[in-house]
Image (cartoon, helix red, strand yellow):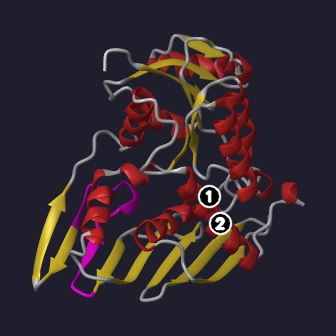
Amino acid sequence: MENKIRWGILGPGRIAHSFTKDLLLTRTSELVAVASRNLTRAANFAKEYDAKYAYGSYEELFNSPDVDVIYIATPHTQHASLAIAAMEHGKHVLCEKPMGVNRDEVKKMIAAAQKNNVFLMEALWTRFNPTIRKIKALVDDQKIGDLSYLQADFAFYALDREVEGRLLNPALAGGSLLDIGIYPIFLAYLLLGKPTKIVASSKFHKTGAEIQTSLVFEYDKAHAMLYSGLTSNSEMKAKITGTKGSIYIHPRWHETNGFSMESNGEKEDILEPTIGKGYSYEIEEVNSCLASGKLESELWSYKNSLELIDILDQIRKQTGIAFPFES
C-alpha cells in the first residue's frame, strides 16, 4: 500500500504503549498524533514514539485533518462517548474492548458509525492472533470432531491496586469480568457461539467491584467452563476438546504463540510466533478494511460485538454486577 493509514492515539496509558510499539512494526501505518487531557503526558508519549502532534485535549485530535483513524485506549466508561464524538467528526475508530459497558452503549456506537459512514471495530486483538485464527479454522473443519468441552481462564492478582483505580472502582466499570473475563468468554463464543444457558457466580471486593466470576456455558452438545479473577494468578492455558481430539493453547493463551493438537493417538506442536506483542494483526485488519473501503470487519463484526455484550449483560444481570452510573 503506497499511502499509509494515519493513526491517532487517544489515552496514552499502559495499553496504548504496547499497542503503539506494534503499530510502528506495521508497514501500512503511520503514527501521527496522540491526545491526552494532560498535554505533558501527550508530549512525552509523542516524543517517545516520534508522533508529529501532541494534543492536550481530545477535541484537537478529533479535528485533526492529518488523522484517519483513532485508537481509543481510555477506561471502559469513556469508550462510548469518545468513540461517538470521534465518529461525529468523521474519524474511523478502533475502540478497546469492551466496546461499551452494556448493549445500549454498543448499539449507539454502531448507529454513530453507520450515520457518519465511518469504520468502527472493537479491539479484541486475540481474534486476529495467528494461532487463534488457525485453531478456529481447524475447529470449523472438524479436525477434532464435534466440540464437547472448552476450558479457559484469565486471572492475576490485583487486590493490592489503588481502590480508586480502574480495576477496583465500580464507577469506572471496574472488576474482572469486563477487563479480563471478556477473553475466555470470547473464546467460547468464537468456537461455540452464543450459549443456550449460562450459570454464573461472582465474588465482590469491599468497593463493590466484582473480583471473581466463574461460568458454565451450556450448548446443545457442549459445556464451556470459564473463569476470571483478580484474587490470584493463573497459568492461563486453554483446552478445547472434541469427539476426535483435543487442542491445548499454549499460555498465555490470549496472546499465544502456538498450540498442541492431539488426534488419532498422535500429538503435534504447532508454533505461530507473533510479530511484537501481537497487536499488529488487528492494526493490519483495520488498515486493510480502510484501504479497501470496508466500514466493518468480517473477522470481528458489529454482530459479533453485539452478541458478546449480550452475553456479558446476561452474566451481570445474573450475578448482580452493577455500576453506579447505570442507575
Looking at the rendering, the stretch of residues picked out in magenta corresponds to 243-259
The residue identified by callout 1 is 306
Q: Which mark is residue 310?
A: 2
Q: Residues within 10 Å of mark 1 (few under 14, many from 20)?
A: many
- Asked if residue 65 is positioned above or below residue 70 in the image, the reply reads above
Going by the image, does 255 lie left or right of 78? left
Closest to the observer, 229 or 95: 95
Tell me if I can see residue 28 in this picture: yes
Q: Would residue 149 appear left or right of 8 to someone viewing this image?
A: left
The picture places residue 164, in percent across and down from the top left corner, at 77, 51
Q: Nearer the viewer, residue 25 or 82?
A: 82
Quarter containing the N terminus: top left
Q: Quadrant of the C terminus?
A: bottom right
**111 sits left or right of 157 in the view:** right
Residue 136 location (% of width, % of height): 32, 64
Q: CA distance from mark 1 to mark 2?
A: 6 Å
- CB within 8 Å, label 1 to label 2: yes
Q: Give the amino acid at mark 2.
A: Asp
Snapshot quadrant of residue 313 = bottom right
Q: Residue at x 46, y 20 (%)?
A: 31
Residue type beneath disc 1: Leu
Is 253 colored magenta in this rendering?
Answer: yes
Residue 158 appears in view: no
Does residue 24 appear left or right of residue 104 in this picture?
Answer: left
Q: Is residue 250 magenta?
A: yes
Quick one: SS at disc 2?
helix
> Which SS class for mark 1?
helix
